[in-house]
């Protein structure tokens, strides 16, 4: 796969300096313009402030691009025809010379090819709730990619539109290392905790980098999910989120939204129903993940 690097990212990788990969679906499908530009720029700034180099990944005119300059970022944020690309969609975007945004799955895949070991996002995709009246069978390719790509993904768990116990079970079946950062609970994206236990906890960046470093040394193909809860001061209560999610889910079912369109639809509906509150929380947790990812990348480089 051909990858076009920004000069800054290429230099950092050549020098063996810490680099943090960032996805672009959160920019094109996660937030409305111009909030998405603010998010993307603040993510990059926080990573730089911790001494690492941000590498936002996207498909531009069919080219897999690692590290976006301002003009490229703005194009992605403003365009209304950006393809949401998981791994299987990449060939279509490349061959069609499309603009495509990468999900957790495809960002991990490209980051790994680029030699980037740490990736910061908001939340991962997972197993959707399949209860009656729900949206039917839907399991995110993020989980499969986590099983076969050795990248450390820093995320605030997964949203409560997903079946979180089932998501954790699949991560276990797939041998994905799951570590809570300063928590023994699986975070529920907008809320600090889902109440579910994670199998391991790291209380400092040093502890975290020891575990992640040991995983890389084992050379198993699987990835890592570093669970970093939303800062408590910005979090929403589980009850509040559950109520919003139930409403948003009903709307999605009633509107016949399916497949890859579900997550963007629900995010938009939550933002509307909460009058922007969920987007504020999403911004806070994403920046928090950017900070921890940069610190982890730096600690791994120092090992
Ligand atoms: N969860 C969020 N915000 C997001 C996504 C997930 O809170 O923007 C995006 C990520 O890019 C993730 C993708 O990889 O949605 C998962 O989509 P799906 O469930 O269709 O696999
Ligand atoms: Mn799906």
Image (cartoon, grey):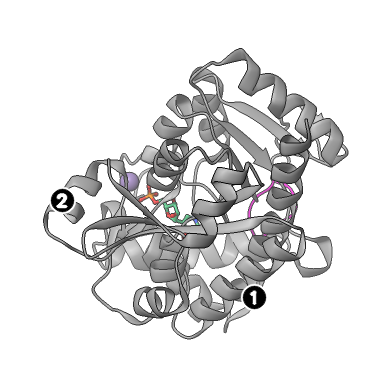
Q: Main secondary structure of the magenta part?
A: loop
Along the horizontal axis of the image, is 93 left or right of 301?
left
Position of residue 50 relative to residue 296, above or below, is below
Considering only order in the chain, which callout, 2 or 1, is on the residue closer to the N terminus? 2
* Left or right of 77 on screen, residue 287: right
Q: Which residue in the protein does label 1 denote?
A: 280
What's the residue at 43%, 47% (across, down)? Answer: 107
Q: Which residue is mark 2?
A: 92
Number of numbered labels in the structure image:
2
Magenta region: 187-193
Q: Assess whether residue 191 is covered by the magenta stretch.
A: yes
Q: Nearer the viewer, residue 20 or 187?
A: 20
Residue 18 lies, in percent from the top left, at: 66, 47
Q: Quadrant of residue 138?
A: top left
Q: Nearer the viewer, residue 248 or 17?
A: 17
| Residue 193 position in % (x across, y down) | 74, 48
Quadrant containing ligand 1: bottom left
Q: Position of residue 175 (x, y in %)?
A: 54, 19
The span from disc 1 to disc 2 (Cα, nearest Å) is 33 Å
């Amino acid at each position: 796969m051909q990858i076009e690097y920004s000069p800054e990212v290429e230099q950092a990788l050549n020098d063996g300096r810490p680099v943090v990969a960032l996805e672009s679906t959160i920019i094109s499908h996660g937030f409305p313009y111009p909030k998405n530009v603010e998010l993307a720029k603040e993510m990059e700034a926080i990573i730089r402030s911790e001494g690492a180099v941000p590498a936002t990944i996207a498909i531009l005119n069919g080219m897999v691009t690692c590290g976006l300059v301002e003009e490229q970022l703005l194009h992605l944020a403003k365009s209304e025809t950006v393809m949401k690309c998981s791994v299987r969609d990449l060939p279509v975007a490349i061959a069609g010379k499309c603009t495509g945004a990468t999900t957790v799955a495809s960002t991990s895949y490209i980051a790994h090819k680029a030699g980037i070991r740490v990736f910061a996002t908001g939340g991962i995709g997972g197993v959707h709730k399949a209860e009656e009246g729900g949206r039917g069978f839907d399991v995110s390719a993020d989980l499969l990619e986590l099983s076969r790509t050795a990248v450390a993904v820093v995320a605030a768990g997964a949203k409560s539109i997903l079946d979180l116990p089932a998501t954790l079970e699949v991560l276990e079946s797939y041998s994905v290392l799951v570590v809570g950062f300063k928590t023994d609970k699986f975070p529920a994206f907008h809320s600090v905790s889902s109440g579910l236990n994670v199998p391991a906890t790291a209380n400092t960046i040093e502890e975290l980098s020891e575990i992640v470093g040991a995983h890389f040394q084992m050379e198993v193909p699987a990835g890592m999910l570093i669970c970093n809860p939303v800062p408590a001061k910005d979090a929403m209560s589980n009850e509040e989120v559950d109520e919003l999610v139930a409403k948003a889910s009903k709307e999605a079912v009633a509107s016949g939204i399916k497949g890859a369109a579900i997550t963007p639809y629900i995010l938009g509906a939550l933002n509307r129903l909460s009058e922007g509150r969920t987007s504020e929380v999403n911004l806070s947790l994403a920046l928090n993940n950017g900070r921890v990812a940069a610190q982890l990348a730096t600690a791994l480089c120092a090992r």
